[in-house]
Amino acid sequence: MKLLTLNTHSLIEKNPSLKAKILAETILKEKIDVAAFQEVNQSINSEGIICSDIEGDIKKDNYLLAVMKNLGEKHGYKGVWIPIKKGYGKFDEGIAILTRFEILAVKEFYVSKTTDPANWKTRRILGVETPAGWFFSVHMGFWEDEDSFKNQWKRLCDNLPCNNKIWLMGDFNSPSHVKSEGYDLILKSSWYDSYNLAKEKGSGATAKANIDGWKNGDDEMRIDYIFSNFKADVKSSFVVFNGKREEKISDHNGVVIETEA
């Protein structure tokens, strides 16, 4: 099984149509089974559209829709998209999951105290149940926020299904090198980092510290992860869309893992 997570930055990027095409080509080439995307945007004023392959109130310029179109008619993927908040005054910013597995159920919930779409710190989680388990697309707040990562993590854990294999995939805004904060809290909560489990792996860095929300310098950090609630047999974990392994298409790099689970 192959999994991909990417904070797409989508319509905020220059030439998003080309980047959606590159993303789709990579999904096909890597034979991705489940992909979790964050910051999946559509224009507020764009026209609504119905797509049989995507569940959600999507519009014509929805980034997931662009990816789906580039996958082609016989791609075999189904997607789910939900809105979270208003971005840059002109976007519906959402979160999405794309999978080749049958979708048995969909679950979504807020982990932020606020549910106001006008508040940029609103955080919402999306999950799908498949025959291979539950997969959640995650975009968390920051450790030092008033509504802190610690509080949001508790809400996330409280809302997860019981007695299931679960994968958490996304942008956790918690650098792995910072001790006694978000990353350590996750590991202490009995979750496994697929990067640590991988038999073969690269550097793991997924973003620089000068992106939106950070702007602390050019140091590389690992803030995008794929966690599991069980010790999976992970063959490999590699960063993609970093300019070395696939062209850069976002201010984040993506993570692809291959696992026997």
Image: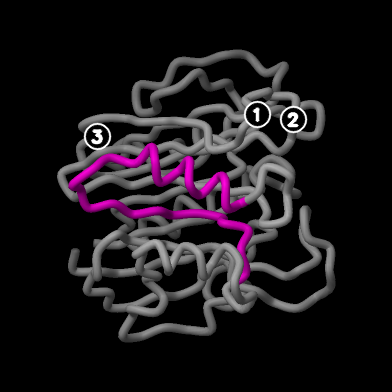
Q: Secondary structure at mark 3?
A: loop
Which percent across, then down, holds residue 184? 51, 70
Q: Which residue is mark 2?
A: 119
Q: Is residue 104 magenta?
A: no
227 to 239, vertically: above or below = above
Quarter of the view holding residue 3: bottom left
Q: Residue at x 18, y 69 (%)?
A: 260
| Left or right placement of residue 32 versus residue 70 in this view | left
Label 1 to label 2: alpha-carbon separation = 8 Å
Q: The residue under label 1 is which amino acid type? A: Thr
Vertical order, 242 against 97 (above or below): below
Q: Residue at x 53, y 77 (%)?
A: 204
Q: Amino acid at mark 2?
A: Asn
Q: Are marks 1 and 2 in contact (CB under 8 Å)?
A: yes
Q: Residue at x 73, y 55 (%)?
A: 144
Q: Secondary structure at mark 2?
A: loop
Instruction: Say which mark, if any, is on residue 114.
Output: 1
Residue 206 visible somewhere in the drawing = no
- Residue flagged by tag 3: what amino acid is it? Ile
Closer mark to the observer between disc 2 and disc 3:
2
